[in-house]
């Protein structure tokens, strides 16, 4: 149904001669493999901008709240990688002048972070490349992408 003539099967990609115990096991390995494949392509896109995927994620989160600042704890709650050290990531972005930070006016224990014009400019440049990354998904239809999203949402439910 979804196969194409130049499709590379998971077993070929990971050079597995034996079959999987179940389709569910194959799906799990396939998700892990595909996540790495996508992450590598994103890293290639971000490399010229000297950013990691976590830094990119923080910038995108901050762009979404712009011009309002966000606390580091709020940023952490919205990150894709929940194990990330947001304070360290923000410090690195601050050194690159892509974000600014200030002590929260209502709670001095918190730090508010906001994206700078330089950060917005970098994201605009990356967006052009990332739009090109969308082409990786041209082999599936909108309907197939919607089905994939439903399945992944169901898996996490």
Image: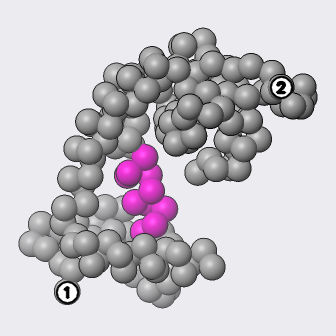
- The correct choice, above or below, for 79 with respect to 13 in the image is above
Rendering quarter of residue 58: top right
Does residue 100 belong to the magenta stretch? no
Q: To which residue does mark 1 refer?
A: 1
Quarter of the image with the N terminus is: bottom left
- Looking at the rendered structure, the secondary structure element under dot 2 is loop
Whether 45 is drawn above or below 154: the answer is above
Of 143 and 54, the residue lying toward us: 143
Q: In this view, does 32 lie above or below 62?
A: below
Q: Where is residue 149 in the image (x, y as percent from the top left)?
A: 42, 73
Residue at position x 31%, y 42% in the image: 130
Which residue is found at the position 55% from the left and 26% from the top? 115
122 relative to 132 in the view: left or right: right
Label 2 belongs to which residue?
Answer: 105
Q: In this view, does 151 lie to the left or right of 12?
A: right
Q: Could you tell me residue 91's position as x and y percent? A: 67, 20
Classified by dominant secondary structure, the portion drawn in magenta counts as helix
Q: What is the total number of numbered labels drawn onto the structure image?
A: 2
Disc number lying in front (2 or 1): 2
């Amino acid at each position: 149904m979804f196969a194409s003539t130049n499709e590379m099967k998971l077993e070929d990609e990971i050079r597995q001669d034996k079959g999987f115990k179940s389709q569910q096991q194959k799906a799990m390995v396939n998700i892990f493999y595909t996540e790495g494949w996508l992450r590598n392509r994103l890293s290639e896109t971000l490399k010229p901008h000297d950013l990691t995927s976590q830094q990119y994620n923080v910038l995108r989160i901050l762009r979404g709240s712009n011009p309002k600042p966000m606390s580091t704890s709020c940023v952490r709650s919205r990150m894709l990688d929940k194990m990330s050290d947001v304070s360290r990531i923000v410090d690195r972005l601050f050194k690159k002048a892509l974000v600014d930070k200030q002590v929260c006016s209502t709670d001095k224990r918190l730090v508010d972070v906001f994206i700078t014009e330089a950060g917005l400019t970098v994201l605009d440049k990356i967006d052009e490349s990332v739009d090109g990354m969308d082409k990786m998904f041209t082999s599936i239809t909108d309907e197939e992408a919607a089905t994939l999203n439903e399945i992944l949402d169901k898996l996490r439910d």
